[in-house]
Image (cartoon, coloured by chain):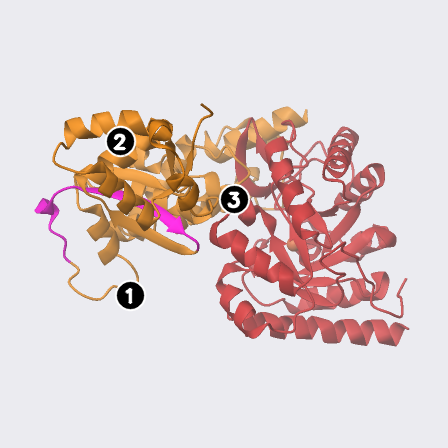
Chain colours: A red, B orange
Amino acid sequence: MPRATKSVVHGMGGGPIQGVGIGLRTPHYGVIQHDKPPVPWFEVLIDNYLGKGGSPLTHLEQVCRDYPVTFHGVGMSLGSTDPLNMDYLKRLKQLVERFEPACVSDHLCWISVGGHYAHDLLPLPYVKQVVDHVAERIQRVQDFIGRRILVENVSSYLTYRPSVMEEWEFLCRVVGAADCDILLDINNIYVSARNHGFDPMDYLRAVPVARVREFHLAGYEDQGEYLLDTHGSVVHAPVWALYRKALAHFGPVPTLIEWDNNIPAFGVLQAEAAKAGAIMDEVCCRAA
Amino acid sequence: MLRKLQQHFFDGLFGKQNDSPILELINDAGARSSAEQLAVYRDSVLGGLTKALAGIYPVCRRLVGERFFDAMAGRFIVQSPSCSPDLNDYGGELAEFIAGFPPAASLPYLPDVARLEWAWHRAFNSADRLGIDLQALAEIGEARREHILFRLAISATLMASSYPIHRIWEVNQDGYQGDGSVDLDEGGVKLIVWRHALTMHIDPIEEPEWRLLTELAQGRPFGRICERFSRYHPANDIGAVLAGAIQRGWIASFDLPPA
Ligand SMILES: [Fe+2]
């Protein structure tokens, strides 16, 4: 349901987030610290700051002093069958308590088995048993770090024979059972829709509006036979079109521009964020 | 069911590829076989880990060339999986792998260059320790001094090589100006790799300093170190060597066990 004002997600100390934020990346530390550009919030890849000191933490401190932040990770391995990695969660909890980000998010996927880590977002089979398994782990993570988390839908390049439900049904069941929030990656929905031949609007319409706290936007690469989620370019036209529909459906959800490969000058990210901001204003004001 | 699927998936990524049981669990996707679909993940996982290693070992990569390095990284990754969710923990055994990798045998200094780059990587991300409390140190009475346990900077790694690896490292930095040739007969070097605040250091150290620092890194009390030091370097004054090491920042704190 479109809301007249921008929806605001509150952080405890880092300040609330709204509008269009930018993913914090190492090559931009200098320009961010020097120019203090007017960015409403930054998303921090928190797994890069697990060390106990040194340059990374110093930069994180500086950014957190100047801007509201969200924490985004891949290390929880929420869909893994290994025990939760308590060392990782302890370190994450320390960072969360110290910097009080507006949101803490990870992915609806698995990255490890047998104590070995792929450092990549691997797909889950969509079956009831896995819904229960993942929801229970999300609950334990939330209890441990003392915060609600957001889980993000990932891009995928295969589906499993044993799956008995659609991805969006799996997502909805997991977040319902875990009682957690959702980070909806609009690009990932588009990529998976193209790869697996579903209608992205079926996805959007199924997702519970009240749980969606953040959107992601990024660029994919067209490999001909499939789309690859590379985060290495501007957001493509069909994803902008889907973003408009998502804003009309969910309201002005805080949105992030992600870029991880071939990282351009900071101004390019600001231009993408401005584009998303203009679309957000246009769609959400008109709807109001 | 999920456990088996995930184990098969990892086997499919890192191990046998064509007859992997995971392929049976993947849906057909038009013209694309399940092996092709899994390969998207294999390329992504291996590509991500290779990129991480390239970031830690830029000098090694420059020395052997990108194609050689990436191919070597591919072999390393399959045999040495990541065991931590923190990607910064990955890759510490690459030097050992290179030492046993026949195609790299023509560059005998390469494993030590890799050790140097790993020490740098660890120092970059390590915890910090506040400066040493010189006043508290001065106030320790003569009789208690032999019990002092000096500590290196937390970021510090001591390393010795039979090759001039600090020179090899230096001339292979971006923007290095000057004579890019290194004479391997220049001989070996002893180094301490460490960080002070945001400044990284690779400092060559002399024999007496090496003796002192390696002894204290093993947790020996100062009295015992003095005994051993005088045996190896009877002509050197350990007091001066200690003062120099504290002043350089190599020694960053001390403990005095209760009497
Ligand atoms: Fe995302």
Q: Is residue A155 visible?
A: yes
Label 3 sits on residue = A51
Measure the C-alpha gap from mark 2 to mark 3.
Answer: 30 Å
Question: Bounds of the magenta span?
Answer: B181-197
Q: Amino acid at mark 1?
A: Gly
In the depicted structure, whether residue A162 falls above or below residue A154: above
Please provide percent x and percent y for residue B239.
25, 39
Tell which of B15 and B177 is nearer to you.
B177
- Which disc, if any, is residue B175? 1
Quarter containing the C terminus of chain A:
bottom right
Q: Is residue B240 above or below residue B218?
A: below
Graded by Cα atoms within 10 Å as few (under 14), some (14 to 19) or many (20 or more), the crowding at tag 1 reads: few
Q: Which mark is residue B100?
A: 2
What whole-number distance in Å separates the C-alpha atoms at marks 2 and 1? 32 Å
Looking at the picture, do discs 2 and 3 lie on one chain?
no
**Is B195 drawn above or below residue A247 in the view shown?**
above
Between circles 2 and 3, the one closer to the viewer is: 3
Callout 1: SS? loop
Q: Can you tell me which quadrant of the image ligand 1 is in?
A: bottom right
Same chain for labels 2 and 1? Say yes or no.
Answer: yes
Q: Quadrant of residue A62?
A: bottom right
Q: Tag 2, which secondary structure?
A: loop
Instruction: Mark yes or no: residue B53 visible.
Output: no
Query: Disc 3, disc 1: CB below 8 Å?
Result: no
Residue type at mark 2 is Gly
Q: Are marks 3 and 1 on the same chain?
A: no
- Local crowd size for mark 3, using a 10 Å CA cut-off: few (<14), some (14–19), many (≥20): some
Q: Secondary structure at mark 3?
A: loop
- Residue at 48% over, 32% down: B18
